Image (cartoon, rainbow, N blue to C red):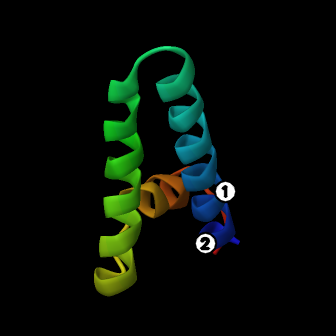
Amino acid sequence: MRGKVVNGIAGFFILTSVILAITVNINWLWFTAFVGANLFQYAFSNWCLMAIILKKLGVPE
């Protein structure tokens, strides 16, 4: 469950930052790159700050 929530939040962040980059300022793409880099490192290290936050909030695994 927590993994799906992490993926959903990451997808939301990416879509939102792309929309903001198109409509507000191109520098929002840096946030997109940050989220993508975190997803990439999560694939190798199995460590994700968002998963830790969700665990503390009581989201079931």
Q: Which mark is residue 3?
A: 2
Which of 47/31 is in front?
A: 31
Side (left or right) of 14 relative to 43: right
Q: State the residue lying farthest toward the bottom.
A: 44
Q: Residue at x 32, y 49 (%)?
A: 34
Q: On the image, which quarter does residue 44 sit in?
A: bottom left
- Residue type, mark 2 in image: Gly
Task: Name the quarter where the C terminus is drawn.
Answer: bottom right
Q: Is residue 43 above or below residue 18?
A: below
Which of 9/57 is in front?
A: 9
The x and y percentages for residue 31 are 36, 39
Mark 2 lies on a secondary structure that is: helix
Of the residues tagged 2 and 1, which is closer to the observer? 1
Side (left or right) of 22 relative to 61: left
Side (left or right) of 46 relative to 51: left
Q: On the image, which quarter does residue 26 sit in?
A: top left
The x and y percentages for residue 37 are 31, 61
Q: Earlier in the sequence, mark 2 or mark 1?
A: 2
Q: Is residue 46 above or below residue 22?
A: below
The x and y percentages for residue 3 are 60, 72
Q: How far separated are the C-alphas under marks 2 and 1?
A: 9 Å
Q: Is residue 43 above or below residue 9?
A: below
Number of numbered callouts drawn: 2
Mark 1 lies on a secondary structure that is: helix
Q: Residue at x 49, y 14 (%)?
A: 24
Q: Residue at x 52, y 61 (%)?
A: 55
Q: Residue at x 42, y 45 (%)?
A: 32
- Residue type, mark 1 in image: Gly
Q: Which residue is mark 1?
A: 8
